[in-house]
Image: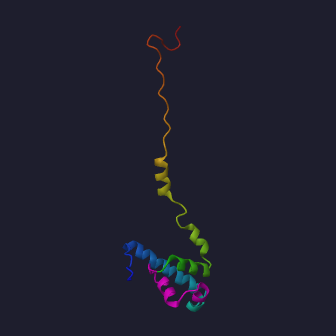
Amino acid sequence: MTSRATPLYPASAKEMEALGQRLRDARLRRRFSMETVCARANLSRPTLYKIENGDPSVAVGFYIQVLRVLGLIGDLSLIAKEDALGRRLQDESLPQRRRAPRKKAPAGASDGEA
């Protein structure tokens, strides 16, 4: 069984590459070798290489393991935290309260006159 690579839009591919570069920079700032991160994240060196290049074929679980090793797992909770578009769509689908129309006064009566 051959696996097909999932095609990405160019903007998504750039985001993946940028994520990989940020992970590489974080590793280097911490002065961790690839071997150290691989051992702590329980993954192979080629997999870490793919992650640092933003390869979309790597399972998201491996990205999470690398974030954990680098101490950046808290950043994961920021993904899709503020969903402005989703909130607007949700608000649009909420039912609108409708008020009953005002009752009209009888034809012969006028306001305040007796």
Classify residue 67 by image quadrant: bottom right
Where does residue 100 sit, x and y in percent of width and height?
Answer: 49, 29
Residue 56 x, y percent position in the rendering: 44, 78
Residue 94 in picture, x, y percent from top left:
49, 46
Q: Residue furthest front?
A: 1
The residue closer to the viewer here, 16 or 56, is: 56
Q: Main secondary structure of the magenta part?
A: helix
Q: Is residue 50 above or below residue 91?
A: below
Foreground pick, 36 / 41: 41
The residue sitting at 48% across, 22% down in the picture is 103
| Residue at left offset 48%, top offset 13% | 110
The residue most toward the top is: 114
**Quarter that holds the N terminus:** bottom left
The magenta stretch spans which residues? 37-57
39 relative position to 51: left or right: right
Residue drawn at (54%, 77%) of the image:
61
Up/down of 96 relative to 15, above or below = above
